[in-house]
Amino acid sequence: MKTNIKWDGKLAFSGVTPSGHKIKMDTAESLGGENSAPTPVELLINAVAGCTAIDIVLIIGKMRLKLTSFEIEIEGERAEEHPKRFTDIHLHYILNGELDTEKVRKAIKLSKDKYCSVAHSLNANITASFTLNGTKDEEIL
């Protein structure tokens, strides 16, 4: 997967995802942004919830259960010190429909423990490189 974002001024950025969807990111005015879009951290925690939600809907469908409504309440705790990463994320699932408790439990566990690539990516090794004034630095950081 490959994508890019472009600086829109101050601390705002926009891009187009590989699937063609436009995204915008910004930060709070108190940090120098304009609060014109979600922050990257807000997108991240919502991506965890969205990824697991898709998994669960697919798994419940394969179990031939009837889901009539579904939402997730998400709470994330971040470290006090930089990089202020998420230390804990709690997902509270609210489901309604013709559902079996054990099958719902199994669907949630399968998503959390096996399928949700976003959640499993949070512990990924992150590397960086950069180009400065048109010259690419060859060192991987």
Image: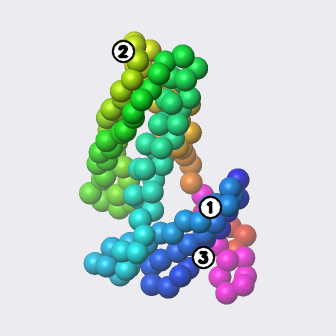
The kind of secondary structure element at disc 1 is: loop
The answer to whether 62 is drawn above or below residue 130 in the figure is above
Residue at the image point whose x is 40% and y is 75% from the top: 36
Q: Is residue 80 visible?
A: yes
Q: Secondary structure at mark 3?
A: strand
Say above or below: 73 vs 5: above
At x 41%, y 50%, the residue is 45
Tag 3 residue: 6
**Foreground of the two, 62 or 98:** 98
Residue 120, horizontal then vertical, whole percent: 52, 38
Q: Position of residue 66 (x, y in %)?
A: 47, 22
Q: Residues within 10 Å of mark 3 (few under 14, many from 20)?
A: few
Q: Of tags 2 and 3, which is closer to the observer?
A: 2
Whether label 2 touches label 3, CB < 8 Å? no
- Mark number, residue 101: 2
Spatial distance from mark 1 to mark 3, Cα to Cα?
14 Å
Amino acid under label 1?
Answer: His
Q: Residue at horizontal 41%, vertical 65%?
A: 39
- The residue where tag 1 is placed is 21
Element at label 2: helix
Residue 109 visible somewhere in the drawing: no
Q: Nearer the viewer, residue 21 or 126?
A: 21
Query: Considering only order in the chain, which callout, 3 or 1, is on the residue closer to the N terminus?
Result: 3
Check if residue 129 falls in the magenta segment: yes
Residue depicted at 44% across the width and 26% down the height: 67
Mark 2 residue type:
Thr
Judge from the rendering whether residue 78 lies leftward or rightward of residue 118; answer left or right: left
Residue 121 inside the magenta-drawn segment: no
Rendered image quadrant of residue 88 = top left
Instruction: Indicate which disc, 2 or 3, sits on the residue closer to the N terminus.
Output: 3
Task: Give the residues in magenta.
Answer: 127-136
